[in-house]
Amino acid sequence: MGCHLNHTGILRYRDPQDKQQSSRYFLFDAGCRNISLKKWGRSQPREISAISLYQLVYGGIIMEITDSKKLTHTRWINLFDVSYTDKTGQDRNWQVVSRNSQPKCISGKFDIPDAVLMIPFHTVLQKLVILREYRVSLAGFQYEFPAGLVDKDESIQEASRRELMEETGLSLTRITGISPPLYNTAGLADESVVLVHCECDGIPSAADNRGSEIIEVHLLSPEDATRILSDAHAMWDVKLWMALKHFAEHGMTVGRDTGLSS
């Protein structure tokens, strides 16, 4: 496969199976999910997906998602059987958990996050806010950041403010950074979360916790973080573990030197 990408955004592609070695040209806009393809002298323009063009540019072999079937029907999450064609052309299936009516590999709605996860710093007490919450799947407590699902038609900022109050009783005062949608366990689920670095104040409270929740609010200094990180029996959310290691070493710089923009 011979490819050449020039500065105008036109890709010239030569198929090694084509004896005439005629070129085909791809016009694309990196901000679009669908890319216009025009083959001069051969046919009228048609559409090619962004991922297909990416793989042509970088010499990859296309893995094509073809269909999905819903296997469960529950309120919060569901299991889907996704059909796809692998790089050898063989038809295969992959089971995907999703919070949506269709998995994102079918709907293409990758820009809409499922949840927000706050990294809150209490500006009055100068401490990082974390939770210790009971998780049924672990049959025990896990250290984690405050987090929750984004409601329909709710902005990231609104969801962050609501969830922080519900889980900790603290008031969000300022957002200092918002990440793009990030994926937790892509081998299992398409759930995405945005990290929201923020400042807060107030007195911690469990008054707004639901009956199904057991949540402890902890406000940590760097010394406190070092102490609980040494607990060999604690269970951790991976995002908290990484942030807390940084906080223990560098203090309140967590959330301010990560390159996130507000």
Image (cartoon, rainbow, N blue to C red):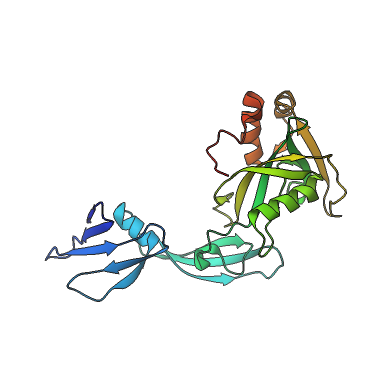
Q: Please give left or right for residue 53 compared with residue 237 in the image.
A: left
> Where residue 202 sits in the image (x, y, percent)?
81, 40
Q: Residue at x 42, y 63 (%)?
A: 33
Q: Residue at x 71, y 68 (%)?
A: 74
> Where residue 64 sits in the image (x, y, percent)?
41, 64
Quadrant housing residue 52 = bottom left
Q: Please give left or right for residue 36 compared with residue 92 in the image.
A: left
Q: Is residue 226 depicted above or below 118 in this figure?
A: above
Residue 19 or 206: which is nearer the viewer? 206
Q: Residue at x 67, y 65 (%)?
A: 152
Residue found at the far left of this picture: 20
Quadrant housing residue 80 = bottom right
Where's the N terminus, which quadrant? bottom left
Q: Residue at x 77, y 32 (%)?
A: 124
> Where residue 203 sits in the image (x, y, percent)?
84, 39
Residue 236 or 215: which is nearer the viewer? 215
